[in-house]
Structure formats: structure tokens, C-alpha cells
Image (cartoon, grey):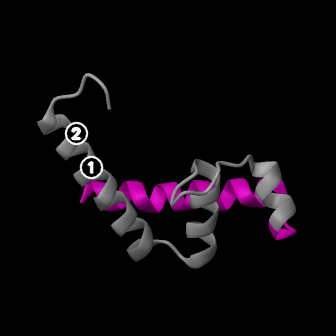
């Protein structure tokens, strides 16, 4: 966060906290897990859709559909 003002850092931290809260409230367990793995949230390493598919024993396209649905749900929540 080099070069950011204190206000910008606080704003960013508040937005991140809000994102994690929405992820917990809005997404189903599988959606939450895929988003966390895909984007490296909660200290997890980010993974490709193929890696996640192999871990869960499902197709890559199914991972993609779940990811798209989860992102759509989160987007709608933030539009409110």
C-alpha cells in the first residue's frame, strides 16, 4: 500500500472487510470455496479453474459457471 494516503488505506480496508462479509452472507459454501481458491482469499493460494476442478472432482466448465454465478451474486449485493 505504498504511496497511498491514510484515508485511502482505511477506505480500502473497509471495502475489503465489506467484501468478506458479503461473501459469507450471500454465497453458498461451494461458491464461497471456489471464490476463495480462485482469487487467493483468506490466506489461500490462488488457483486456476482446472486446479479447482481436479480438487473437487468436477469439470472446469462447472467451476466456471459456479464462479460466474457467485461473482454475479456479489455484484448485485454491492449495487444495492
Q: Characterize the local packing of mark 2: few (<14), some (14-19) or many (20 or more) Cα atoms within 10 angstroms.
A: some
The picture places residue 52, in percent across and down from the top left corner, at 77, 58
Per the image, the residue denoted by label 1 is 13
Q: Residue at x 70, y 53 (%)?
A: 64
Name which quarter of the figure residue 76 lies in: bottom left
Report if the CB atoms under discs 2 and 1 are less than 8 Å apart. Answer: yes
Q: Residue at x 39, y 76 (%)?
A: 25
The C terminus lies in which quarter of the figure?
bottom left
Q: Residue at x 57, y 49 (%)?
A: 39
Residue 68 placement, left or right of 9 = right
For label 1, the SS is: helix
Q: Is residue 80 above or below residue 11?
A: below
Give the spatial CA distance, label 2 vs label 1.
6 Å
Judged by its main secondary structure, the magenta piece is helix
Q: Which residues are magenta?
A: 56-80
Per the image, the residue denoted by label 2 is 9
Residue with the most extreme top position: 3
Residue 50 placement, left or right of 8 = right
Amino acid at each position: 500500500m505504498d504511496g497511498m494516503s491514510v484515508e485511502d488505506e482505511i477506505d480500502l480496508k473497509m471495502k475489503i472487510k465489506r467484501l468478506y462479509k458479503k461473501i459469507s452472507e450471500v454465497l453458498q459454501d461451494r461458491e464461497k470455496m471456489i471464490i476463495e481458491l480462485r482469487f487467493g482469499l483468506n490466506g489461500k493460494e490462488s488457483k486456476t479453474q482446472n486446479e479447482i476442478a481436479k480438487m473437487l472432482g468436477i469439470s472446469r466448465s462447472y467451476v466456471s459457471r459456479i464462479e460466474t454465478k457467485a461473482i454475479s451474486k456479489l455484484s448485485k449485493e454491492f449495487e444495492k
